[in-house]
Amino acid sequence: MSYLSRNIALAEASPAVSLPEAALLALPEKVLQFGTGVLLRGLPDYLIDKANRQCIFNGRVVVVKSTDGGDINAFTRQDGLYTLCIRGVEDGQLVEENVVSSAISRVLSAKSQWAEVLRFAQTPDLQVVISNTTEVGIQLVADDVRQSPPVSFPGKLLAVLYVRWKAFKGDKSKGLVIVPTELVPDNGSKLEAILLELAHRNELEADFIDWLETANTCCNSLVDRIVPGRPDVGAYNALTEELGYDDDLLTMSECYRLWAIEGDEKVRQVLSFGQADKGIIIQPDINQFRELKLRMLNGTHTLSCGLAFLSGFETVRGAMEDDVMGQFISRLMVDDLRPGIPYKIDETVARDFARQVLDRFRNPFIEHRWLAITLNYTAKMQMRNVATLVKYFELHKQVPQCAALGFAAYLLFMRATHQQDHTWYGELSGETYPIQDEKAGYFADLWQRLAPAELVSTVLHNQALWNHDLTALPGFSSAVTGYLQQMLEDGVYATVAKHLRSEVTA
């Protein structure tokens, strides 16, 4: 079977594939992208390709890879083409879609083709920079922008901007819109500050530093899409039969997509691809999307993971397919977490987001394991849920019962039975499970010494854990204690079922 390439894509692929028209392969290069990872291919590059198909953005992407080898050869062999296999649930409907993306025109090695990167930086068509260099990428390190190439991502980007400034003699109309997608809060603001600091450390001209600040825009952004990447061998072989070709860059993705970009009308005009898909949102403040994701998606995961795992469910999808657990997770998100978000959010937006998240949880093509979600359980509970709890009590003056039940299950999950090789383990149905949490030893000690009621009070009162005294939330300690004792006596799943029955009869 042949590999995907221009000829294969246009002549031999099966009808199950959405192919690009030949004209899309000749569009001008408008975007410089740092990174070749699956998140970039599955979200920004996919959305740019979608815009090109609608004759909106009409530009392709030049990608910079920091190291040689790996998928750079696959990009060359496949003419920059790759297949995105989209699988999931959207608006309650099953979605299976195969798209050959033609957004990427070429991939350049920073190590061996840096001069070519700098030549592209001097072209008039370039308008946009995108990056995903992991969270470590947006850090200030000692760097010389005159190296070939500089060491860090900010150093490389500053070198690109510097040669562009020189090439266009400081023309402010040739500044770029820069959109980092690294999962760092205020990623654009942090990147801009690093660029300015590096410019000063490299003693670059004052006129350039002025151009850097005034002609370029670093946008804060938030990306959200599960992109598992290449499937296992069995699934890959089945897909190649379906597609009619091999693809070393084949990428799996869920349906849901969000690319929220903080910007004004000028940014919106440059990023015209924003018109192509409802998942692209460009507006002056994107904090509501960060809050929705943190409080409702991540927060629901954290308050459900111990409960679902101790009830015998291995995956999120498995729990959602169960009437009791699926109903509990939905109520937790909609009734307890949504009303407590500590940020002003339109109720319709929040309910739409909840519906989309529940669709994602039901995705039959993604195996998201509850035990993996328990990693760093305590830190996640503090970051994702405490502010929501506090706000809920402030607004509603009552206990969010589903959240209290989820918190009780967290405490039960943290009950260790033994330690081995510096890892604490709990026990469920005669089998052990790892408690991968830096506070595992603290909880092991409490469970050995204290009765449930005293343990609950001690943990909730510990402001070093929560930055709040959670015993001050009226009735919360009593509710958590009651649920914990009930789980110890009747079992976790039975406790959830009983709670739901009591809600119906209340």
Image (cartoon, rainbow, N blue to C red):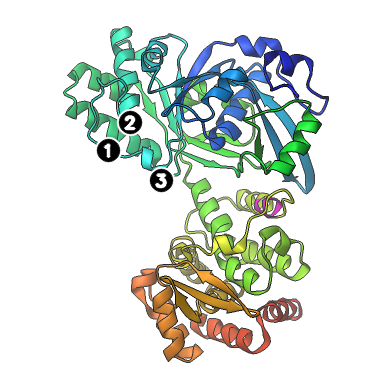
Which one is earlier in the sequence, the residue at label 1 or at label 3?
1
Write the residue at 67% across / 18% down: 5
Cβ atoms at labels 1 and 2 below 8 Å apart: yes
Q: Does 279 sit above or below residue 329? A: above
Residue 147 appears in which quarter of the rendering?
top left
| Viewer-closest of 496 and 78 | 78
Question: Which residue carries the number 2 mark?
Answer: 154
Question: Which residue carries the number 3 mark?
Answer: 185
What is the quadrant of the C terminus in the image?
A: bottom right
Q: How crowded is mark 2: few (under 14 residues within 10 Å), some or many (20 or more)?
A: many
3 vs 2, front mark:
2
Question: Which residue carries the number 1 mark?
Answer: 140
What's the magenta bit mostly, secondary-structure-wise? helix
Amino acid bearing label 2 = Pro
- Residue 329 x/y as whole percent: 66, 65
Q: How far apart are marks 1 and 2 (CA)?
A: 8 Å
- Give the tally of numbered discs: 3
Look at the image and give the residue range highlighted in magenta: 357-361
Write the residue at 53% across / 46% down: 289
Which one is earlier in the sequence, the residue at label 1 or at label 2?
1
Residue 197 appears in which quarter of the rendering?
top left
| Viewer-closest of 136 and 467 | 136
Write the residue at 64% across / 61% down: 334
Question: Which secondary structure, mark 2?
Answer: helix
Residue 259: which numbered mark, if any? none
92 displayed left or right of 63 = right
- Residue 137 x/y as whole percent: 37, 38
